[in-house]
Amino acid sequence: MTEGRDAAAGRRAVRDALGVAVATSAYGISFGALATASGFDVWQTCVLSLLMFTGGSQFAFIGVIGSGGLAAAPAAITSAALLGVRNIAYGMRMAPLVGGGFFTRAAAAHFTIDESTAVALGQKSLRGQRLGFWVTGIGIYIGWNLTTLAGALLGDVLGDPKAYGLDAAAAAAFLALLWPRLRRRQAIAVGIAAAAVATVLTPVLVPGLPVLVAAVVAVAVGWFNWLGREEAPAEPADVPEREGLP
């Protein structure tokens, strides 16, 4: 019985991971095209995806450089770093799930992104969480770098990448992962409050800060358990299963 549940959880995790990987990787075409349009060479664009591999930080970096040139490099690095700070929190959350020794955790650090964290936390068993994390992270890494190269090579031939709706692909994937979790008042309140804060602050703050402020709002709501005190406790099925337990 336990093996059957584990197998089903594994299949679900892989299915979710591959779906998110395909949707997110498609957005890499947009990054490649925009990077070359901002003055980056093909090899520079590819190195950014190979080494930085945090979509939001990459877009912030090329956006600032594209508008201000090399003189804007400090601002570009700052914006990219601010957007990347959230990955530290992701790493702290993922560390117990990833397991393994030093080299496993070091490899996992490179694949700890929004999507791999979201897919992992969306699974109900430890096996599913680990599969979701690794398949999503590695799948996006491969796909993102391939589509980055394609976008950089095609460049102006593509026209405006937003015309194809690629800028909405990652957001749609996130919404699909988030929607099943919005079943309680507190989760809904956190989502609405964080989205409202980010929307209001985006026009007035440098890239990266609105995301961090919205995250603080979410943490505050969760810490004080606002709107959640009177709700029923989670069902046993929501608690991740541990290996070796029935």
Image: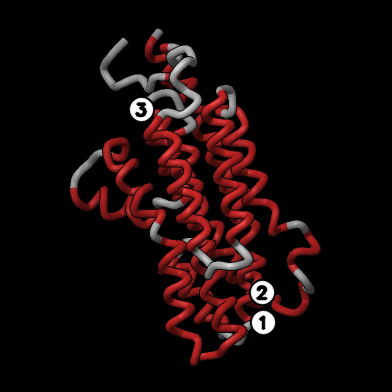
Residue furthest to the left: 101
Residue 102 x/y as whole percent = 19, 50
Q: Amino acid at mark 3?
A: Leu
Out of 147 and 198, give the one closest to the viewer: 198
Q: Amino acid at mark 2?
A: Ala
Q: CA distance from mark 3 to mark 1?
A: 43 Å
Residue indicated by mark 1 = 37
Out of 230 and 241, give the one closest to the viewer: 230
Name which quarter of the figure residue 172 lies in: top right
Residue indicated by mark 3 = 126
Q: Which mark is residue 33?
A: 2
Circle 2 — which element?
helix
Q: How many marks?
A: 3
Q: CA distance from mark 2 to mark 1?
A: 6 Å
Q: Amino acid at mark 1?
A: Ala
Q: Give the vertical position of 158 relative to 99 (above or below).
A: below
Q: Residue at x 44, y 52 (%)?
A: 113
Q: Residue at x 45, y 55 (%)?
A: 212
Badge 2: residue crowd in 10 Å (few <14, some 14–19, many ≥20): many
- Left or right: where 231 falls relative to 203: left
- Left or right: where 170 falls relative to 220: right
**Residue 156 shows in the view:** yes
Badge 1: residue crowd in 10 Å (few <14, some 14–19, many ≥20): some
Q: Residue at x 57, y 33 (%)?
A: 189
Q: Are marks 2 and 1 in contact (CB under 8 Å)?
A: yes
